[in-house]
Image (cartoon, rainbow, N blue to C red):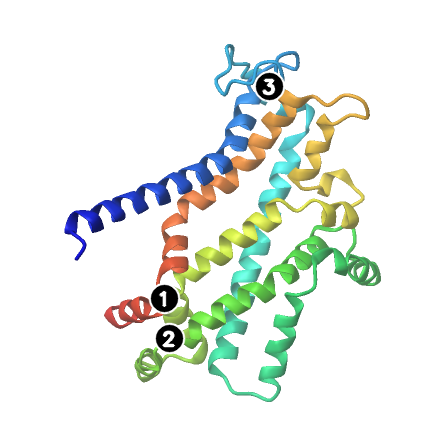
Amino acid sequence: MKSELYYKSKKITLNILIHLFLISVAITCLYPLLWMISSSFKTQDIIFSDISLIPRHFHFENYINAWREGGFGRNFLNSIIYTASVVFGIVIISSLAAYAFARLRFPGRNLLFIMFMAAMMIPIPGSFVALYVLLNKLHLRNTPIGYILCMINVGLSTSIFLLKTFFDKLPKELEDAARIDGCSKLGIWWHVALPLAKPVLAVVVVFNALSVWNEYILALIIFDSRKFMPLQVALKTFQGEFVTNYPLLMAGLTITALPIILVYLFMQKYIVNGVTSGSGIRMKKLFNV
């Protein structure tokens, strides 16, 4: 018989190895972000000669110059408007569609759902030509509404899949109780389904906000006018044909990354709950509501 000390030491050793592995992964992920922030405070002369994460002298004027030279004001506002509009549209449309697929019975329901799922397998660049032609015929190219509609379409399939999976597990007793209280189908969706789906909605919001905020190629295809361009396109200002102003570029990247990091930190508890909660735990929480 192996002693109790053996099992305790084995468990401690295993935990140490797991934590060391996780710490190494975290450092690998965080180091480029820290290097970007550190480089944003340096000058062009020392950015590559001084590889330390703590600069000897902090040049805060890089952020002011990046904001002015990059014309970030208009582009920053554009990205906020695009992200908010697209995420709002995706949440409303995908939650309605997912609830309909999960609860309503209508002809062609399975076929429509399969078509949405099949769209997940098509890479975004594979649809660029079709989107360009369609927007031209609808006279929506080089317009914000055309870009917003395209980005809503990009995020719908995955969002519907996530929300339908959650709605399928909702106890029908909750809907029956709401129906007795006089709720219509839309009332049940609004007052029962959506509040209980907060963890999944948080995942949908963050993933789609990240997708819209970081979009670059589709914006270049749809927009001709710079005044409609999102923030990512403005970063090209610091990359010349022969010389790239890396400190200003790093400052611009830091400004660009900060809003989406704040959104993730704000919704982190909902995301963790939505990803890690098992179906049994989630069902228990639903019955306790």
* Nearer to the camera, 176 or 9: 9
Say which amino acid is labelled 1: Leu
Measuring from the top left, give residue 196's x and y in whole percent: 36, 66
Disc 1 to disc 3, C-alpha distance: 45 Å
Q: Residue at x 35, y 79 (%)?
A: 175
Mark 3 and mark 2 lie on one chain; the one further toward the N terminus is: 3
Which numbered dot is residue 170? 2
Q: Are marks 1 and 2 in contact (CB under 8 Å)?
A: yes
Label 3: few (<14), some (14–19) or many (≥20) C-alpha neighbours in 10 Å:
many
* Amino acid type, mark 2: Leu
The disc at residue 20 is none
* Real-space CA distance between mark 3 and mark 2, rounded to the nearest whole angstrom: 51 Å
| Element type at mark 1 | helix
- Which residue does the numbered mark 3 point to in the structure image? 62
Tell me which residue sits at (44%, 61%) in the image.
Answer: 200
Is 150 situated above or below 227? Answer: below
User: Which quadrant is the C terminus positioned in?
Assistant: bottom left
Front label number (1 vs 2): 2
Q: Say which mark, if any, is on residue 196.
A: 1
Within 10 Å of disc 2 (Cα), the crowding (few <14, some 14-19, many 20+) is many
Quadrant location, the N terminus: bottom left
Q: Earlier in the sequence, mark 1 or mark 2?
A: 2
